[in-house]
Image (spheres, helix red, strand yellow):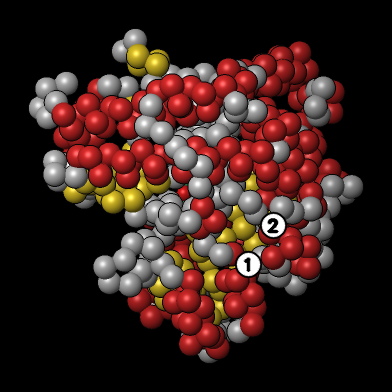
Amino acid sequence: MLAYKNSLDFAKEKDLNDPLRAYRDQFYIPVINGIETVYFTGNSLGLQPKSTKSYIDQELDAWKNWGVEGHFEAIKPWFAYHEFLSEKAAKIVGAKASEVVVTHSLTTNLHLLMVSFYVPTSSRYKILCEKKAFPSDQYALESQVRFHGYDPTDAIIEVAPRTGEHVIRLEDLLETIAQHGQEIAVIMIGGVNYYSGELFDMEAITKAGHQVGAKVGFDLAHAAGNVKLKLNEWGVDFAAWCSYKYLNSSPGGVSGMFVHERHANNKNLPRFAGWWGHDKSTRFLMEPGFNPMPGAEGWQLSNAPVLGMAAHLASLDIFDEVGMDALIAKRIDLTNYLEFLINDLTARKGDQCAFEIITPSDPTKRGAQLSILLKGMGKSLFDKITKMGVIADWREPNVIRVAPVPLYNSFEDVFKFSACLEKAIDNDGNV
Ligand SMILES: *Cc1c(COP(=O)(O)O)cnc(C)c1O
């Protein structure tokens, strides 16, 4: 690993040599109480690109000038608005454009996909997921199980970290899949766990799932725009993600969904239908009899919420320009530097406050996020760094989640974060 240094000069030098450094200027960095924040919660809500406004304004103008005619007359006709996003979103998740559609919101899309891929039978009705999945996913899976008449305590298999460990071992996941193989209908896992920051080996999980005859899907809320994804190549059956975390596309913004091409023309899959999923050449004949579009588009219910889609398109255009490989290269360096500084702090301040990073240290097993377990000082430390302008995320009982984001965070941000922690430890009680 590169020899990192705990110094502002070193961090500034890294920024000077960063090929993506100009992109920070394309985002609004929040200034709170006169302090430019160290914004480390791009894993929760990504920052606003300065270009977003013009994309939304274009649609507001089209609406103003055309009314309903905007569906066909707008510069980007609303009738086909989602089509402007598919290919760009598909590149981010390693899919073909026909396998991806941007529509609805994340939890809605998870439900729609479960309707199609969770088809339980009396012998094969279980869902395997990770322990401590994001609550919305837990509720979604439980309600799906109940909807089909099963009991979640029996039908949901959770794979947990071993006692005393914080992340789930791949071997334990694979063993559980093999062990319960004949009973598992669907495997549904968060590609990157929101709490621990662990990146799962989706390729291996997909292979193991298919070997036992299960369908395999992923929630990519914390993975899309963060880690390398190859959904098509890995053979993943389905996936969904939100656009407002690493993808910077407005609070509560639209979601992406992926359906593997081998299911593209399977009209026998059960699905909840709506007019926007219907064959577009006959959609406006308004005739009875649902005939789904091939590919992911066939899962759309409603016409596109164009303003939210416009915000997403603004961000996708930036991702398209930068490319995931360049982003990932910087992300690895930024997060490694953060890890170095945190460990350095523990080595020097361990008597007052020690930090245990529960996220895997192997860069192939994590994305941007580090989840830091505090030992010695608690929430008061977090409150102090918040006052100094650090925006991070606190999880009870004592975990700080931070994600330096390669598009707009700098090495200087990472240094400042660590310097704030050090100052907060030194000035215990008075900042
Ligand atoms: C952020 C997140 C959600 C949020 O779902 P919405 O439907 O967009 O509110 C769901 N699942 C995971 C894993 C998340 O990280």
The x, y position of residue 10, in whole percent, is 45, 26
Q: In this view, does 255 lie to the left or right of 300?
A: left
**Of the pair 114 and 257, the residue shown nearer to us:** 257
Inspect the image, locate mark 2, and give the three-letter code of the amino acid beneath it.
Lys
Quarter of the image where one finds residue 255: top right
Among numbered discs 1 and 2, the one appearing first in the sequence: 1
Distance of mark 1 from mark 2, alpha carbons? 8 Å
Q: Mark 1 points at which residue?
A: 203
Circle 2 residues within 10 Å: few <14, some 14–19, many ≥20:
some
Residue farthest to the left? 429
Determine the residue located farthest toward the right in the rendered image: 281
Q: Residue at x 60, y 78 (%)?
A: 208
Looking at the image, which residue is at 57% across and 60% down?
218
Q: Where is residue 357 in the image (x, y as percent from the top left)?
A: 33, 51
Residue at image mark 2? 230
Answer yes or no: do the residues labelled 1 and 2 have beta carbons within 8 Å? yes
Residue 149 sits above or below residue 412 on the image: below
Write the residue at 50% across / 47% down.
1
Q: Any mark on residue 190, and which? A: none
Mark 1 crowdedness (10 Å alpha carbons): few <14, some 14-19, many ≥20: some
Compared to 393, does 428 lie above or below? above
Left or right: 417 as drawn, with respect to 352:
right
In the rendered image, residue 163, in percent from the top left (x then y), is placed at 27, 72
Question: What residue lies at 12% left-to-right and 29% top-to-bottom?
Answer: 428
